[in-house]
Amino acid sequence: MCYARPVADVAVVIPYHGRTAGAAEELAHRLGHRKGLEVILVGPGKEAVRRPGSGPMRNGVVHLEAPAGRGAGLRAALEQVNAEVTVLHDADTAWPIEAIDQLVGPIARDEADVVVARRSRLPLGERALAGLARWVSNATVADPLSGQRAFRTAVLKELSLQHLGDDVDAELLVKLAAQLYRFKEVAIDSAPSSRGAGAWLSTGRTLLSYATMRNDADNAHEGYNTLARMEAGAPNYNAWLGARFREHAGQRVLEVGAGIGTITELLAEGREKVVALEVDDFYVRRLKNRFRNTPQVVPYLSDVALADWQKLQSERFDTVVLSNVLEHIPDDGGAVRRFAQIVGPGGKVLIVVPALPQLFGALDEAVGHYRRYTDATLRAVLEQNGFEIDVLEWMNLAGIPGWFVNSRLFKRRAMPPLQLRMYDQVAPLVAKAEQLVKLPVGMSLFCVAHKPLS
């Protein structure tokens, strides 16, 4: 079979176990003689292949020993990879090696960060698992657990992989999709899976754990799933919130604490510039991926206390937006004074904050809240630090019971997705009702304040 040289520097990582050692070796040596191609064979021991030896093998193939499993093997291999693109290849000769060029191409052309080989026919069990994988990760490819996948190597090396076994495939998918890296697929003829039922069951269990129990996407950001579920599970609520901001926002906006970009996206259309300030590099990378083709949105990595406020002042912002952010800042008064410095006279600050200290519980702790506000405490922090109140309203009365039950009674640290979807169905009705009636209390407070003209 003829194999053309890839269009970019490529490493092919072939994990194997005892039963697939022969196929792994055959693949490695079919690929290993090609110039500019790294081939890394990684498995449980040197005795498992017919040509044992650690370090470089004949034809440029490297053999690494990783007895703990597929995930451990991938992590060991990534330490050796120097190529721009890494192909993760199942140890099965039925996968067409000429498809590697097709996988590498979109990454080399900067059209994708992850490219999967889409089989034309999947066995029933794998089809069901692929559906589960798409549902959990929101990945937009039909065969997300394919045995041939190409990755931008820098993207893989940014991940903090924890799983040692076959369930690393679920971990890879969830974490890459969470960061909004660009997925693409190329069609190939059907190829059988070299992974057995045990591997697929392990992958399925891990996917379900990400859907139901794990509250992070990178082992470090406990509140990520809450933010992601709020975006995916409550589009009507987010649209309601976005409309309130859009009604008052100007053309040049500083959004403080942009998070995963939910409100950023709702603000961006029609604005001259939106600077999305975020303290965490995990979220900034996601923002850069999400707004790659939206030039008016500029992600900015910084803590509020450490931002270059002199430089930000030169941006001539007319609006500062904080959507459920002020409660994350230890010195909220100091932050408000900074906002007053960077907007001109008449400039606005638009704020939504969680309300009612009586609701403070496990959900607040999980997403890093220092406090929940009352109308009096929010008014004080704004008026004492350079702003005058134009609008101060309670909102989202209907959300109080769900937050209280989940956060205070059940002490959950992530909002159950089904509850979010159910609430989102009534959110438009709640929004219309709140336009007609002045609420006496609510789960949140919405505020518009301006910097005095003199």
Image (spheres, rainbow, N blue to C red):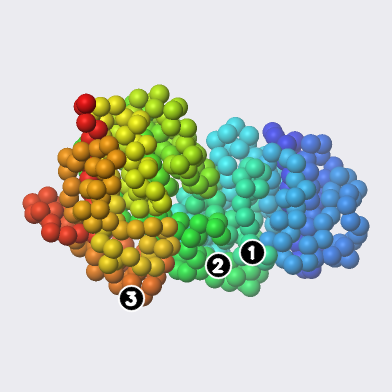
Q: Are marks 1 and 2 in contact (CB under 8 Å)?
A: yes
Task: Give percent across and percent down for residue 142.
Answer: 50, 53
Mark 1–mark 2 Cα distance, whole angstroms, equals 9 Å
For label 1, the crowd category at 10 Å Cα-Cα, with few meaning under 14, some 14 to 19 and many 20 or more, is some
Tell me which amino acid carries mark 2. Answer: Thr
Looking at this view, is 452 or 101 the one in front? 452
Mark 3–mark 1 Cα distance, whole angstroms, equals 33 Å
SS class, disc 3: helix
Residue found 63% across the figure and 58% down from its top: 161
Residue found 72% across the figure and 61% down from its top: 72
For label 3, the crowd category at 10 Å Cα-Cα, with few meaning under 14, some 14 to 19 and many 20 or more, is few
Looking at this view, is 374 or 385 the one in front? 385
Q: Is residue 166 visible?
A: yes
40 up-or-down from 152: above or below: below
Task: Give percent across and percent down for residue 319.
Answer: 30, 33
- The residue where tag 2 is placed is 206
Task: Give percent across and percent down for residue 121.
Answer: 55, 57
Mark sitting earlier along the chain (2/3): 2
Looking at this view, is 313 or 35 the one in front? 313
Q: Is residue 443 left or right of residue 32?
A: left
Residue found 88% across the figure and 52% down from its top: 55
Q: Are marks 2 and 3 in contact (CB under 8 Å)?
A: no
Residue found 91% across the figure and 57% down from its top: 53
- The residue where tag 1 is placed is 163
- The residue where tag 3 is placed is 409
Tell me which amino acid carries mark 3. Answer: Leu
Q: Is residue 221 left or right of residue 317?
A: right
Q: Is residue 208 visible?
A: no
Mark sitting earlier along the chain (1/2): 1
